[in-house]
Image (cartoon, grey):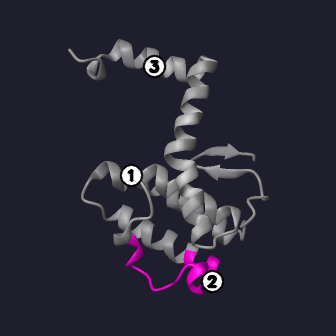
Amino acid sequence: MPLTDDPTFKSLLRKAGREDPVMRQIQDAFFDDRYFRPAIAWADEQGFVEALSGLVIYDSFIHSGGILWLIRQMFPESPPAGGGDERAWTTAYVNARHRWLSKHTRPAVRKTTYRTTCFKREIRRSNWDLGLVPINANGVQVRI
């Protein structure tokens, strides 16, 4: 049986991710290199400066590998670098992504609308600097 199918091995990996400082450090470095830096580079290139916009973009990189053109084509707003309004773009993108996730053919993907539900709530609260805490992220109260 390959280790990817071994429940004991997977349990040990989860435990190491929670408890082993070296494992956590490696995970943080991986996520920085693979997702955070590319997301922030994309956001900077497109002229985004608001913390909430950055979080939305980072989440898209983690969850979907980037800003999917399929979703991007679902709304007309331009990013700030293209002369658009940042908050209008972010709001339209979150709404389009929510629709896309909720209608996805895979049930597991449809269940991830909690991500965009959180962002929609923060947009309604006008929490662009993420200073209004706690933020309810799928039932977890996050304090930044």
Res. 111 mark: 1
Spatial separation of the CA atoms under disc 2 and disc 3: 43 Å
- Residue at (38, 78) in percent of width and height: 73
Spatial separation of the CA atoms under disc 1 and disc 2: 30 Å
Residue 23, located in which quarter of the rendered image? top right
Q: Is residue 20 above or below residue 65?
A: above
Res. 85 mark: 2
Q: Amino acid at mark 1?
A: Lys
- SS at mark 1 in the image: loop
In primary-sequence order, the first of circles 2 and 3 is 3
Q: Is residue 77 above or below residue 125?
A: below
- Residue at (37, 63) in percent of width and height: 102
- Residue at (43, 73) in percent of width and height: 96
Is 127 left or right of 84, judged from the image as shown? Answer: right
- Viewer-nearest residue: 39 or 100: 39
| Percent coordinates x, y for residue 25 in the rendering | 61, 27
Residue 142 covered by magenta stretch:
no
Res. 32 mark: none
Q: How many marks?
A: 3
Q: What residue does disc 3 label?
A: 13
- Packing grade of label 3 (10 A; few <14, some 14-19, many >=20) is some
Spatial separation of the CA atoms under disc 3 and disc 1: 25 Å
Q: Which residues are magenta?
A: 71-89
Closer to the camera: disc 1 or disc 2? 2
